Amino acid sequence: MKIGYLGAGAWGFALATLLASKGYEVVSWTIFEELADTLNQSKEHPMLPGSKKLPTQRFTTDLKEAVQGADLIVESVTSAGIRPVFEQLKEIDLPSCPIVITSKGIEQDTGLILSDVICEVLGEEFRPRIGAISGPSYATEVVKGQPTSVTGAAYDPSVTEIVCNAFNTETFRVYPNNDMRGVALGGALKNVIAIACGVAEGLNLGYSARAALMTRGLHEIKKLAVAMGAQPDTLYGLSGMGDLTVTCSAMTSRNFKFGYLLSQGKGVEDAKKEIGMVVEGAYSCVSALQLSKKLGVSMPISECVHQVVFEGLPPSEAVAQLMKREIKQEHL
């Protein structure tokens, strides 16, 4: 099987290597010529020390070369990059194969989950071919073969099966799910809560504060997801609570680290530069607030994150603002 892989960042490289370990031919596309050359020379990925490509992997800056004749297309670009990349893809004679989303985000202004963005670009007839992988998984751990479990989802059950079979290994267990919307929203919105948890870590607020943020954050995620048509139970699974737990727990999470750096007095752009990778939570935070206002869903933690990142609210004042909110009955 040939897999056309879009994106060669840390996450894209880790998953491409996982797929190549199963003997698949994996051709990864990147816009960065120097990165492609480095990886083709079997040098380690600059963001993943000690990593090396496998014999069935190669890298190219030619999008057509990557996807032509592919039996499966997998993307690991950014949520903001989904639309322009698939607009480029539309100009190519696409193979009629499944497309797997591994990015986590919600498009700003439109409020579309990423599968809806792809359908808007390629046409609604592509929807049955679209699937997704989401769950607790760091690139640094996946590339080392450390065990985890994630969710594989699609609109069509036959594509769900293809996705799960393609990615499932002895260390990467894939559970099928039929709720694409819930899987997508859990993966996108947990990044916003992770920023809040990073702030709490930087302010030395303790484990209890982090646990409270995660619990109330999951409540926010579920409320918005259900309002958008997701199944509530999905948010308690691997692509919801599972991903939230790992993303809110360590500096390995770029969103958690971003919040931590902000709490230490770093400016937004300086924090992003230090991380060196896209902070998806900062992007999806805008989308979350746009949707919450449109749908009338209260999301106080996400709103405070937005105020800290985009409106200059000091992190300590954001904490005080949350603690002073009117107390209401806990509804789950």
Image (cartoon, rainbow, N blue to C red):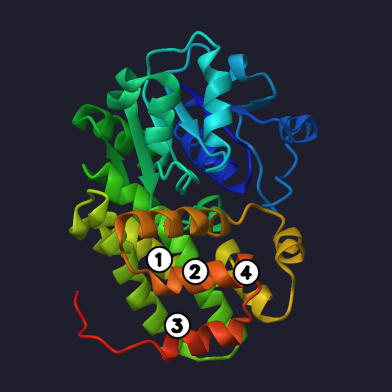
Residue type marked 1: Leu
Q: Secondary structure at mark 3?
A: helix
The residue under label 3 is 210
Q: In the figure, 178 relative to 63: above or below?
A: below
Asked if the residue at tag 3 contacts the one at tag 1, i.e. Cβ–Cβ closer than 8 Å, the answer is no
Q: In terms of sequence position, does the residue under pointer 1 or pointer 4 come before the other?
A: 1
Asked if the residue at tag 4 contacts the one at tag 1, i.e. Cβ–Cβ closer than 8 Å, the answer is no
Question: Which x, y percent locates residue 195?
Answer: 54, 69
Q: In terms of sequence position, does the residue under pointer 2 or pointer 3 come before the other?
A: 2
Q: Secondary structure at mark 1?
A: helix
Q: Secondary structure at mark 4?
A: loop
The residue under label 2 is 194
Residue occupying image coordinates x 55% and y 12%: 91
The residue under label 1 is 244
The residue under label 4 is 311
Residue type marked 4: Glu
